[in-house]
Image (spheres, helix red, strand yellow):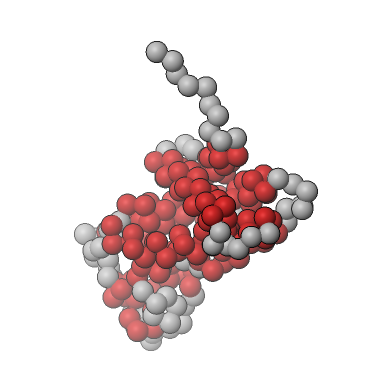
Amino acid sequence: MQSVTPRRGRPRATTHQEVASVALDLFARNGFETTTVGDIAAAIGIHRRTLFRYFPSKNDIVWGDFDWVLARLRVHLAEGKSDEPMIEVLRRAAVRSNSYPAAQLQELRIRMTLITTVPSLQAHSMLRYAAWRNVVAEFAADRLGQEPDDLAPLALGYAALGASMAAFSRWVANLGDDLEHDLDEAYALLEYGFRLPEKRP
C-alpha cells in the first residue's frame, strides 16, 4: 500500500469536493477497505474529527452529494410536458441527470466502481437506491394519479434503477463507452419492452 504523508502546519478548513477528491484518489490507489478516515484526513491536512463535519462516514464519501443527485433528477423529470409519454420523459431525464463534464468522469468512474464492487458498501447503497427509486415513483404516481407505493409507480422505480445500474455497470467495465449513450440505450430497451430480434437456432 502506498503510504500517506500528512501535510504539516496548522489544521485548516476544506470543502466537500476536496475531501471527496482526495478520498477517491486514495481508494483507487490503496483500496477502499485499506484506506482509513485517518489516512484521508492526514492527506488533506485536517483533524480526523474535522473530516466528519463534511461526511458522516467513509461510506458517505463514496456517494458524494447524493441530495444534489436526487434534486437534479427531479428537475429534469419536471421538465417533461404533460402530453409526453411518461417513459420518454423518464428516459430523457435519466440521461440528462447523468451528464457530466469530461473532467469529472474519472472520479465518477471510481465512485461507481466502488459502489458496484465493494461488499461493505452494498448495505449502504440500498438506502441510496431506495431514495432514487422513490423520486421516480413519485414522478410516476403524479402522472398516473396514484400513490408512490402503488404497484405501477413502484414497478417503474425498480425498473428504472435496473436500467441505470445496467448502464453504469457497462460503462465502468468498458473504458471506451460513453455513459450517456449507454443510459439512453438501456432506457430505450425499457421504453420498447425489450422487443429485440431473438437469435433463432
Report x, y in % for residue 62: 40, 63
Closest to the observer: 155 or 180? 155
* Number of marks: 0
Question: Split into 4 quadrants, where in the image is the C terminus?
Answer: top left
Residue extending farthest to the bottom is 10
| Picture quadrant where residue 200 is located | top left
State left or right for residue 190 relative to residue 37.
Answer: right
Q: Residue at x 48, y 73 (%)?
A: 16
Q: Residue at x 36, y 65 (%)?
A: 124
| Picture quadrant where residue 27 is located | bottom left
State left or right for residue 195 relative to residue 36.
Answer: right
Question: Split into 4 quadrants, where in the image is the N terminus?
Answer: bottom left
Report x, y in % for residue 14: 46, 77
State left or right for residue 121 relative to residue 105.
Answer: left
Residue extending farthest to the left is 1
Can residue 16 be seen here? The reply is yes
Closest to the observer: 10 or 113? 113
State left or right for residue 182 relative to residue 8.
Answer: right
